[in-house]
Amino acid sequence: MATRLGLCLPQAPQYDMGRDVPDVARTAEQIGYESLWVYERALFPEPATQGLYGVPGLPWPEHYRSVPDALVTLTLAVTATERVRLGTGVLVAPLHGPFQLAKTLGTLDAASGGRVVAGFGTGWSLDEYAAAGVAPFEERGKVLDEVLDVCQAVWGPDPVSYEGNLTKIESAVVGPKPARPIPVLLPANTKKALTRLIDRADGWMPIAMGAEQLAAQWRQVQDMAAERGRTKPIETAVRVNGVQYTAKAYDGADRAPFQGNVEQIVTDLKAHAEIGLDEFFLDLQASTRDAQELKDVAAEVFTAARAAGI
């Protein structure tokens, strides 16, 4: 199975951002990981005004109390690495002004020599939308479409011209340009989102929540691509959220995917990788105490995964 492996950079409160992000990034590249990823969480409402993911009563994880800015975190990894791809998995695009987001990502890609992957989503937190002040939550799909339009314009040839609901560029030179076309990946949790993915994005960015479920989702993506006549390959990068690492094997009968020791995590990873998707990136940070443990576990998982044929 020719599967790429990536690692999420440390953004949890127990890590020192300025010291640990470059350290983990450098070490992950040396281990052999092929990509590094960040996610976005803008704030932590207290008291809670809605449940996690908008599910009533579902509490927000404690590590969401302090999440460093995604693009600043990714920037810290640029000069510490030379070859790994640098991805957002995901960035809540409608929380950002479309022009400034396109400009920042283009600059980051130029600085990294063409290694940025833009994973965009629409998010779910009403409080984050209110704080960002870009557009109402109800317009998130329209704003994402405008972000995609503006990125295409700003990353393309000069002079740049564009007029949308939030953005107006009369005619301008906008640089620096990305070192190469930045791949855009999107989740697809609704039919409308799936249509946007097929028609507008380079690839798909799901969450691994079980091999059978992921395989069914992938068939749905492929069916929609065939239905809409897409011939361009769909790149895939799967986020393995909140891996719960334990030093000893987890022996519970109701063990969730990616919960347990390295052997159990790799067993789950192999089952998912057999679906045939391009890349999996692991979020180990919540269950490791510090950067050293994160690096040690990341090395163990990578070595065991490659030994298992992944």
Image: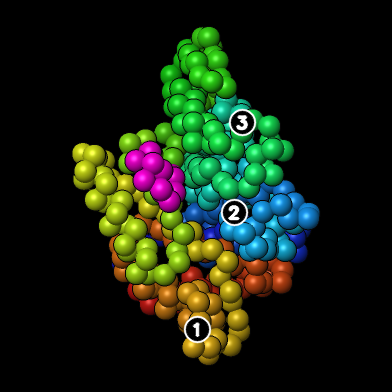
* Mark 1, residue position: 254
The residue under the point 37% across, 35% down is: 200
Q: Residue, x 56% and y 36% (percent of image)?
A: 138
What crowding class fits label 3: few (fewer than 14 Cα within 10 Å), some (14-19), or many (20 or more)? some
Which comes before the other along the chain, label 1 or label 3?
A: 3
Query: Hey, which quadrant is residue 244 in on the image?
Result: bottom right
Circles 1 and 3 in contact, beta carbons < 8 Å: no
Segment tinted magenta in the rendering: 185-197
Q: Is residue 191 magenta?
A: yes
Would you say residue 72 is visible in this rendering?
Answer: no
Q: Secondary structure at mark 2?
A: helix
Residue type for callout 1: Asp
- Residue highlighted by disc 2: 54
**Sequence-earlier tag: 1 or 2:** 2
Q: From the viewer's perspective, is 232 left or right of 173?
A: left
Q: Say how the picture is coloured.
A: rainbow
- Residue bearing mark 3: 135
Name which of mark 2 and mark 3 comes first in the sequence: 2
Identify which amino acid the numbered label 2 is placed on: Gly
247 displayed left or right of 152: right
Secondary structure beneath dot 3 equals loop
Q: CA distance from mark 2 to mark 3?
A: 18 Å
Front in this rendered view, residue 307 or 144: 144
Amino acid type at image mark 3: Ala
Label 2 environment density (alpha carbons within 10 Å; few <14, some 14–19, many ≥20): some
- Name the residue located 49 percent from the left edge and 70 percent from the top edge: 302
How many residues crowd mark 1 within 10 Å: few (<14), some (14–19), many (20+)? few
Mark 1: secondary structure: loop
Q: Camera-side residue: 153 or 107?
A: 153
Calculate the distance from the C-alpha at mark 1 to the C-alpha at mark 3: 42 Å
